[in-house]
Image (spheres, rainbow, N blue to C red):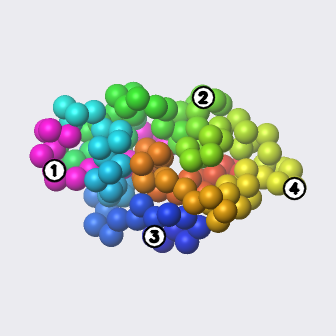
């Protein structure tokens, strides 16, 4: 899926099912994996790449084909879409939390509008800042839509 709002992070490798929830996740860029996946898992995967599980209720963050999944609790920062914590970041580039998104969702300037504006003005770095390796806007717009 293309993310026209943003810097990319798209990966056209085939979707691969998460070994725990069975939903198809998306392949992440090698720089996303090296930013977040603990070294022991990187070594084990041997450069075969990682996929990210997009299912909010699934504890898996990353998984290599046929290898051991990496749980969200194993990485150094909270994975916003998988965390119930209101203080968890949803937009990693501009530091916007789940709580901030919710508080502004009914305002005339919702978080998604600010993020879209700032991406145009300042650029973004989702590939190495967002654990999903993708632009946050899709998830944030879904959160705003309730
Ligand atoms: Zn999963």
Extent of the magenta region = 42-58
Residue that numbered label 1 is attached to: 47
- The residue lying at 71 percent from left, 44 percent from top is 101
Determine whether the residue tagged by mark 2 lies in a helix, strand or loop: loop
**Magenta region's main secondary structure?**
loop
Q: In what quadrant of the picture does the N terminus appear?
A: bottom left
Q: Is residue 54 visible?
A: no
Determine whether the residue tagged by mark 1 lies in a helix, strand or loop: loop
Badge 1: few (under 14), some or many (20 or more) residues near its Cα, within 10 Å?
Answer: few
Tell me residue 3's x, y (percent).
52, 68
| Contact between labelled residues 3 and 1, with CB atoms less than 8 Å apart | no
Tell me residue 47's x, y (percent).
16, 50
Mark pair 1, 4: CA separation: 45 Å
Q: Which mark is residue 71?
A: none
Residue that numbered label 4 is attached to: 108
Q: CB of residue at label 1: within 8 Å of ligand 1?
A: no
Badge 2: few (under 14), some or many (20 or more) residues near its Cα, within 10 Å?
Answer: some
Residue that numbered label 3 is attached to: 1
* Vertical position of residue 14 compared to residue 146: above or below: below
| Contact between labelled residues 3 and 4, with CB atoms less than 8 Å apart | no
Say left or right for 43 vs 14: left
Mark pair 4, 3: CA separation: 28 Å
Q: Is residue 119 visible?
A: yes
Determine whether the residue tagged by mark 3 lies in a helix, strand or loop: loop
Give whichever of discs 1 and 3 has the lower sequence position.
3
| Contact between labelled residues 3 and 2, with CB atoms less than 8 Å apart | no
């Amino acid at each position: 899926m293309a993310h026209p709002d943003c810097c990319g992070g798209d990966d056209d490798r085939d979707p691969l099912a998460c070994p725990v929830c069975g939903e198809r996740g998306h392949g992440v860029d090698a720089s996303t994996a090296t930013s977040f996946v603990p070294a022991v898992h990187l070594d084990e995967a041997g450069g075969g790449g990682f996929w990210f599980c997009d299912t909010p209720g699934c504890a898996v963050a990353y998984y290599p084909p046929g290898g051991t999944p990496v749980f969200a609790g194993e990485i150094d920062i909270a994975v916003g879409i998988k965390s119930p914590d209101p203080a968890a970041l949803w937009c990693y580039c501009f530091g916007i939390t789940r709580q901030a998104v919710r508080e502004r969702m009914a305002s005339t300037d919702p978080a998604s509008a600010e993020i879209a504006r700032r991406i145009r003005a300042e650029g973004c770095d989702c590939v190495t800042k967002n654990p999903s390796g993708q632009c946050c806007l899709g998830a944030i717009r879904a959160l705003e839509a309730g």
